[in-house]
Amino acid sequence: MVKKISSILFLVLSHLYSVAQSPFEIYLEPMDIPSLGGIQAYAFGQTDGKWLIVGGRLDGLHKRQPFASFDIAGNNNQLVVIDPISLQKWTASISSLPISIQEQLSSTNMEFHQEGDYLYLVGGYGYNNATAARKTFENLMAIHVPNLVNAIINGTSIDANFRQISDLQFAVTGGHLKKINHTFYLVGGNKFDGNYNPMGGGSYTQVYTNAIRKFNLIDDGTNITINHLPEIVDATNLHRRDYNVVPQILPSGEEGITAFSGVFQPTVDLPYLNCVNIDSLNYTVNNSFQQYYNHYHCAVLPFYSEVNNVMHNVFFGGIAQYYDSAGILVQDNNVPFVKTIARVTRDANGSMSEFKLPVEMPALLGTGAELIPLKTVPQYENEVFKLDELTQDSTLVGYIYGGISSTAANIFFTNTGAESSASSQIFKVYVIKNDISGLDKLNEQSVGTLKMQVYPNPNGGEFEVNYFLTKSTDVKISLMSITGKEIEVKLIKNAGAGENQYHRKIRNLDNGGTYMLTIETDYETAVQKIIIEP
């Protein structure tokens, strides 16, 4: 079965799917560890090639039944160590630990970050014995990963490997904990207290942080000291949870992070399509970029090319408001589970573009999964991979583990708990650089009858435009800068019905950039974003 899935994925990958040459390709190889068990929305650390899995849920999407969601039976009440090379696993119960540590360790959607030997956990949503209800825990926990992993493997006491402090600033779930240089950034998320009820009512309170909370952490191995820095609050643009926050190398060469998409917008229950770029001083909302794929938390792979000063982020499956159907971008405001693997690329000028890759997840997977990077592959301090130093044709860069496996795209309004489950699947993730001629598609939005396509995209100013006419008509093709400046307009009189092609070479665009190409007929208009490289 594994060989069959691998072959299918490779055939999909090798197919010349669409329109723009890719700097690399992605290949997924399924692997299985006997009796591993499924998990989603967990935290992880690693040491010596072994993974430490903490918290998360053993079931699938939370049920659409009052007070049935996040039940105690679905808590992960053990610590798991996984060796992806020897295909072994070890477990340890957390029942010997103090109740406050047990509760946080068995919670879901914690924020986490590993710094050297220590895995730091923040917040998380789970069952609280004192209130006999669920809450967001106001704790930060430090775990000594190498010592704990050794204790679990050897079956010795685990108790000495945990330290925990309380601080209301850490009462966050569904956000992300990252670092820029020496400062921690707790980005987005919410404080959800009480038992979840999909029908509403007074059983819980939910307060978004709307913030980037910054702090310095000093840990001498015994005491943890927190120095909170001024937080950044933006109730319009930072009202996000359950999304992707990814370490970056910025065009300046400095470390940064980007918050991609997220739910929900303040005025409508839909994901954000823009992103927030964060550096060591401030943040910028990028409204000129719209991310159509991969809106919910999923595995993400970040790459940076220093030679080209280009940052790439690859997103694997999950949930999204848009998906591709036979080359047509479909909008579904129910925000379904998807198979999409897409890449968001930032160029040296800071312009961002989205590419749908020709390879997909083999099923509706990815939501609540993590990409566990291979530490032996060259990376920057913030775990961004060094693309220029991947010299082999094919490089194993990490593994995707767990997440929600859904039986159908839209199960949210009928979910009884049987429609999805926590996945036990592991995928090896390979980056292929030199010998694959696979193609991407750049925000191809061929909605409607025009079925507009531009290729290659990106390009050096010379490209083809394909479009389909249902009847003979005049066609106007316009190229505009992203700021609205008109670059070129072409009027084609009485173009024939059926497939049409327009070839153009644009000159005097030395700086390149992002442009909007528009096709207008007397009955329909289509717009395509294109990248012209200098």
Image (cartoon, rainbow, N blue to C red):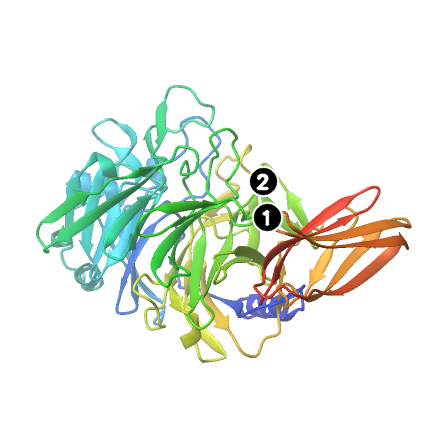
* Residue toward you, 508 or 144: 508
Residue pictured at 71% horizontal, 65% vertical: 463
The vertical placement of 95 against 248, above or below, is above
Q: Which residue is mark 1?
A: 483
Q: Is residue 482 left or right of residue 495?
A: left
Instruction: Measure the C-alpha gap from mark 2 to mark 1.
Output: 37 Å
Position of residue 327 measured from the top left corner of the image (x, y, whole percent):
70, 55
Residue pictured at 42% horizontal, 53% vertical: 369
- Observer able to see residue 363: no
Position of residue 271 measured from the top left corner of the image (x, y, whole percent):
51, 39
Tell me the quadrant of the picture where the N terminus can be found.
Answer: bottom right
Q: Secondary structure at mark 2?
A: loop
- Circles 2 and 1: CB distance less than 8 Å? no
Q: Earlier in the sequence, mark 2 or mark 1?
A: 2
Residue pictured at 34% horizontal, 39% vertical: 73
In which image quadrant can residue 108 be found? top left
Question: Label 1 neighbourhood size at 10 Å, few (<14), some (14-19), many (20+)?
Answer: few
Q: Nearer the viewer, mark 2 or mark 1?
A: 1
Question: Label 2 neighbourhood size at 10 Å, few (<14), some (14-19), many (20+)?
Answer: some
Position of residue 368 measured from the top left corner of the image (x, y, whole percent):
43, 48
* Residue toward you, 531 or 158: 531
* Residue toward you, 457 or 406: 457
Mark linked to residue 410:
2
Residue pictured at 29% horizontal, 32% vertical: 135
- Observer able to see residue 46: yes
The vertical placement of 111 against 301, above or below, is above
Identify the amino acid type marked 2.
Asn
Identify the amino acid type marked 1.
Thr
Q: Is residue 454 left or right of residue 171?
A: right
Q: Secondary structure at mark 1?
A: loop
